[in-house]
Amino acid sequence: MNLEIPDGLGDLLRDFTVAVLKERPGDLYDFAVDYFTKVRDIRKPKDVPMYIIVEDDDEAGEPDRMAFKPKASSGRYARRQSVSAERYNPEEDEDEDDHIIYPKTDEQRERLTKTVSGILLFRSLEPEQTAQVIDAMFERKVTPGETVIHQGDDGDNFYVIDSGVFNVLVDVKGEDQPVHTFDNRGSFGELALMYNMPRSATVRSATEGTLWAMDRNSFRRIVLKSAFKKRKKYEDLLESVTILQNLDRYERMTLADALQPRVYQDGDAIIKQGDDPDGVYFVEEGHIRITMFSQDGTETDIGTRTTSTYFGELALIENKPRTASVYAVGRVKAAFLERECFERLLGPCLEIMKRNSQVYTMYVSN
């Protein structure tokens, strides 16, 4: 039997997969119904195409691909096909040594590090990778009225605003309409690099300003490849945790994407008895020491744990302050899951965790 794949099916399924990975829905089937309903509605002509800009987490998202189809006539949209044809597969990228470094003063590095740490894209990077991001960024000075990126052009750089006011404009029936203003903070340009799309809006400076830019290759090597490696590493870690083995691959992958790296040095307190719970921890490397304070104020060791174990879930399950303290023994790398993600992503494992917590409570009470 010869089966012919309909035109557009690959792009449709790819876009749906990207949406699932970004939104992390609790119910995949309900999400699919809503997603494809919206895709159908989006195909209807619109006067104003969707645009995406990133200034904080609430505004992050993916642009509407349907609104930026290439025009038949020659013009700046004609490069759409060359962008779409360019693929980046982090699994096939074996280049680990091609690191670009642009010199910066200590003051510039400190300021840029603080700025980058607040950008959603870079929050999951480990310190070494964040340092690579800082190294790869180069300074660009702009003058009032200067166009930084142009709607429809190929994506070349990702930009972080150091200073200045920048207007975001969208071409509506041949006229640039203002849709947003960045005022001395924010970032833009990453979606064209991530999703092989033309620029979805024009960004023009309203004042003098300073930008820090990262080129396409550095962005993909550091951000996209590190995200791929992080997911693979955390998937392997989660597979080794006994209570998580009943998660399916999609659930494990979603959980891996939500984990944040944490590093502790010998003697550091990871959690303290009496503190409000902020999340659960999975030990990636190293050893931890668990202690409790008795009624007379004496702190007593009650156990140790090592790789492929977790802790901190008891306070979340019971919604009570921490009942014990945990310290790093030597250097410890942990994967941290925020409280808000705990129930949503670990629903299938909660009953097992509750049973384990009951055993733990009986143990410490005796």
Image (spheres, rainbow, N blue to C red):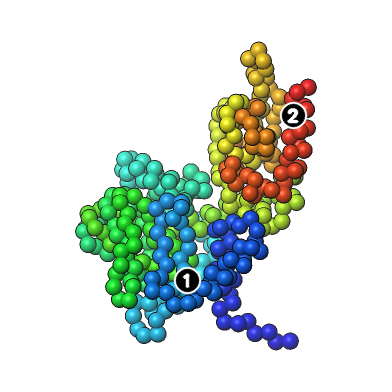
- The amino acid type of the residue labelled 1 equals Arg
User: In this figure, which residue is indicated by the disc labeled 1?
Assistant: 65
- The amino acid type of the residue labelled 2 equals Thr
Q: In which quarter of the image is residue 296?
A: top right
Secondary structure found at label 1: helix
Q: Residue 122 shows which numbered tag?
A: none
Neighbor class of circle 1 (other Cα within 10 Å; few <14, some 14-19, many 20+) is some
Secondary structure found at label 2: helix
> Is 194 drawn above or below residue 305 in the view shown?
below
Q: Residue 361 shows which numbered tag?
A: 2
Q: Are marks 2 and 1 in contact (CB under 8 Å)?
A: no
> Which residue is drawn at the image coordinates 74% and 50% (left, top)?
245
> Which residue is drawn at the image coordinates 32% and 44% (left, top)?
108
Q: Could you say where residue 209 lies in the image, as x and y percent from the top left?
A: 25, 53
Q: Earlier in the sequence, mark 2 or mark 1?
A: 1
The N terminus lies in quadrant:
bottom right
Nearer the observer, 301 or 65: 65
Residue 154 visible in the displayed image: no
Q: Could you say where residue 221 lies in the image, as x and y percent from the top left?
A: 48, 58
> Is 104 drawn above or below residue 227 in the view shown?
above
Q: In which quarter of the image is residue 138?
A: bottom left
Q: Could you say where residue 60 lies in the image, as x and y percent from the top left?
A: 46, 56
Q: How far apart in space, not on screen, are marks 2 and 1 (Cα)?
A: 53 Å
Q: Could you say where residue 214 lies in the image, as x and y percent from the top left?
A: 38, 57
Neighbor class of circle 2 (other Cα within 10 Å; few <14, some 14-19, many 20+) is few
Give the residue at the far top of this rendering. 296
Residue 12 visible in the displayed image: yes
The C terminus lies in quadrant:
top right
> Which residue is drawn at the image coordinates 33% and 40% (left, top)?
106
Q: Is residue 157 left or right of residue 358?
A: left
Nearer the observer, 166 or 10: 166
> Is 236 drawn above or below residue 330 in the view shown?
below
